[in-house]
Image (spheres, rainbow, N blue to C red):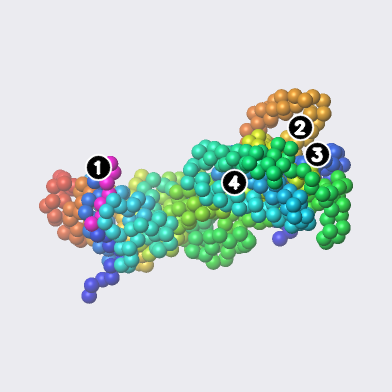
């Protein structure tokens, strides 16, 4: 039985002043999968991510989410549909508390333009925030100012903010970048746990992480898909060996 | 419940005693410009949007109320409502038109629009705005509802303005602590992230700017009620600068800072201008001195100090005081 495709791109293109950052990408993502996107630097991974999340508009091609065309939707609408990206460069609300960082995002599904209630008296939002802080292991530090967190915790906070928007598909751009080996291990566990309920697309450089957690891998090279398959297939693929894995 | 509003009650009591130690007309001016600056700071301090053109909304409020009084013989309440409506509509439209520009470009665009209002009122619309002379011929004001109050009496006028200012401050406080208000912090801190959380950052900014214009317009409408006529200067660009100076003086990262800034600025202005027509020199020097002494504004710097104290053993009082700002 064919699995439901939640996200699909058809002939996706992105030019930056004549340079094709993403070129004719046809990408299909089945529900519930952990998909890694790998490729050498400049292969177009981050651009591809930004196209999926609605940050950039493609030069040509279409993006379908559950079969619905979302190509021209602004980023906040894409997010409300359930497709959310966490940034490669940590992007949080630095002067707010950890709790407030997540609470702001959690509030999105409940109320946006309410001028009369008290922001800190929305029981379902507070409850959800506590659950997410628990999931990403920041409950102890909920009152800390976000900017004062150690780097690894800021990365978790970023994932927490992303989760608080109730995504169906989570796009993680290098979640383990700059983390210690121990933190990387925790992140892998977290991603695996999240994958029980979410579909996850992840851009990652750490090959042991990629090979360990992915159901399947898409290899980008010069903006196009070079190969796609299970971790084993990708590992044994000659083209991939040649352009990317090199001597490994 | 009451604890949340303790700060507003305290400020209300302090404002109530103003006529005991300064002249009642200065006190009324402080209330009006305090409200103006606080409204302005909803945009600057809370949403992170700098505007050099709030005189447009102050002026729309002033002329809106003034024209209702002059031409339609409206009651004080109705004319205040007219001023409010004109100012909020103005802020909504200008905000929506300019919001895609950022930082200083936004500030200057709004300033340009405010100057357009000024020149419209000066010449093309002279027959209804009174042009250079301002809008005169407003009948003597009195309150007919809920009880009779002669607003020609400076003390009555002061209490009337105080009542409305406090109501506005209460509403403003409420809005800033609403779910929408909490988004403004996010907007100021990291607009990109807010967008990535599924919020329409542009609409949020426009709404914040409208709220800011609404309170500035209320101040303008009260200005008309206070003076009994509308000076053309309400629209002038210098009047856009006033709330900015007051806000920086008091502290843009505090709720009551702009009110304190307005108090100091207007008190000095009124006091010094009695002795010399060159009062700007002295008030200017004082502003420079205060801003150099209190880089975060007076309340802002006190708050910072208390934050530092709060970490220490003796910090109990400091923590308590901090909650007041």
Badge 2 density bin: few <14, some 14–19, many ≥20, Cα 10 Å: some
Residue sitting farthest toward the front: B127
Looking at marks 4 and 3 on the same chain, the residue that comes earlier in the sequence is marked by 3
Towards the viewer: B251 or A102: B251
Residue positioned 79% across, 29% down in the render = B273
Above or below, A193 relative to B182: below
Q: Is residue A35 visible?
A: no
Q: How many marks?
A: 4
The answer to whether marks 2 and 1 sit on the same chain is: no
Q: Residue at x 76, y 32 (%)?
A: B269
Mark positioned earlier in the residue sequence (4 or 2)? 4
> Which mark is nearer the camera, 4 or 1?
1
For numbered disc 1, what is the local secondary structure? Answer: loop
Assign a secondary structure to mark 3: helix
Q: Quadrant of the N terminus of chain B?
A: bottom right
Name the residue: 20% across, 48% down.
A221
Instruction: Point out which mark residue B26 bears.
Output: 3
- Which residue bears the numbered disc 2? B269
Q: Is residue B47 left or right of residue B269?
A: left
Mark 2 vs mark 1, CA separation in Å: 60 Å
Tell me the element at label 4.
Answer: helix
Instruction: Name the residue carrying label 4.
Output: B43
Which of pointers 3 and 2 lies earlier in the amino acid sequence?
A: 3
Distance of label 4 from label 3 (alpha carbons)? 26 Å
Residue A13 part of the magenta-drawn span: yes
Q: Is residue B160 above or below residue B20?
A: below
Q: Give the labeled residue for mark 1.
A: A18
On what subunit does the disc labeled 3 rest? B
């Amino acid at each position: 039985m064919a699995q439901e495709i939640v996200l699909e791109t058809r002939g996706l293109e992105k030019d930056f002043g004549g340079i094709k950052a993403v070129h004719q990408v046809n990408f299909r993502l089945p529900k519930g999968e952990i998909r890694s996107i790998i490729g050498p630097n400049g292969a177009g991974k981050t651009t591809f991510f930004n196209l999926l999340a609605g940050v950039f508009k493609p030069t040509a091609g279409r993006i379908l989410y559950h079969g619905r065309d979302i190509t021209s939707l602004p980023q906040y609408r894409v997010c409300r549909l359930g497709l959310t990206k966490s940034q490669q460069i940590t992007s949080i609300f630095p002067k707010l508390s950890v709790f407030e960082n997540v609470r702001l995002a959690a509030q999105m599904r409940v109320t946006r333009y309410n001028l009369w209630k008290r922001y800190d008296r929305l029981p379902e939002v507070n409850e959800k925030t506590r659950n997410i802080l628990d999931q990403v292991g920041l409950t102890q530090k909920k009152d800390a100012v976000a900017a004062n967190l150690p780097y690894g915790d800021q990365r978790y906070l970023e994932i927490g903010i992303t989760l608080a928007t109730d995504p169906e598909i989570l796009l993680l751009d290098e979640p383990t970048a700059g983390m210690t080996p121990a933190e990387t291990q925790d992140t892998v566990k977290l991603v695996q746990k999240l994958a029980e309920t979410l579909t996850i697309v992840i851009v990652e450089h750490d090959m042991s992480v990629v090979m360990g957690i992915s159901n399947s891998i898409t290899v980008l090279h010069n903006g196009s898909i070079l190969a796609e398959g299970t971790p084993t297939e990708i590992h044994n693929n000659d083209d991939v060996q040649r352009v990317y894995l090199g001597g490994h | 419940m009451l604890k949340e509003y303790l700060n507003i009650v305290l400020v209300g009591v302090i404002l109530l005693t103003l006529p005991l130690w300064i002249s009642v007309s200065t006190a009324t001016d402080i209330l009006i410009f305090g409200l103006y600056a606080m409204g302005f700071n909803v945009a600057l301090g809370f949403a992170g949007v700098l505007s050099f053109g709030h005189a447009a909304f102050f002026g729309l409020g002033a002329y809106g109320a003034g024209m209702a009084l002059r031409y339609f013989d409206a009651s004080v309440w109705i004319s205040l409502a007219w001023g409010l409506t004109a100012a909020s509509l103005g802020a909504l439209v200008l905000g929506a038109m300019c919001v895609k520009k950022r930082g200083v470009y936004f500030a200057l665009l709004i300033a340009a629009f405010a100057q357009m209002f000024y020149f419209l009122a000066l010449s093309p619309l002279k027959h209804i705005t009174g042009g250079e002379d301002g809008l005169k011929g407003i009948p003597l004001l009195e309150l007919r509802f809920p009880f009779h109050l002669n607003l020609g009496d400076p003390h009555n006028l002061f209490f009337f303005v105080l009542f409305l200012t406090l109501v506005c401050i209460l509403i403003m406080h409420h809005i800033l602590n609403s779910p929408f208000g909490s988004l403004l912090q996010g907007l100021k801190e990291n607009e990109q992230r807010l967008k990535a959380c599924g919020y329409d950052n542009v609409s949020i900014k426009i709404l914040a700017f409208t709220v800011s214009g609404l309170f500035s317009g209320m101040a303008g409408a009260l200005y008309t009620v206070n003076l009994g006529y509308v000076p053309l200067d309400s629209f002038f660009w210098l009047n856009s600068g006033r709330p900015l100076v007051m806000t920086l003086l008091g502290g843009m990262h505090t709720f009551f800072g702009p009110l304190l800034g307005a108090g100091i600025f207007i008190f000095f202005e009124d006091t010094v201008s009695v002795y010399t027509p060159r009062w700007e020199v002295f008030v200017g020097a004082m502003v420079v001195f205060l801003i150099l002494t209190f880089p975060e504004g007076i309340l802002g710097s006190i708050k910072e100090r208390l934050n530092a104290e709060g970490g220490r053993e003796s910090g109990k009082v400091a923590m308590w005081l901090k909650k007041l700002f």
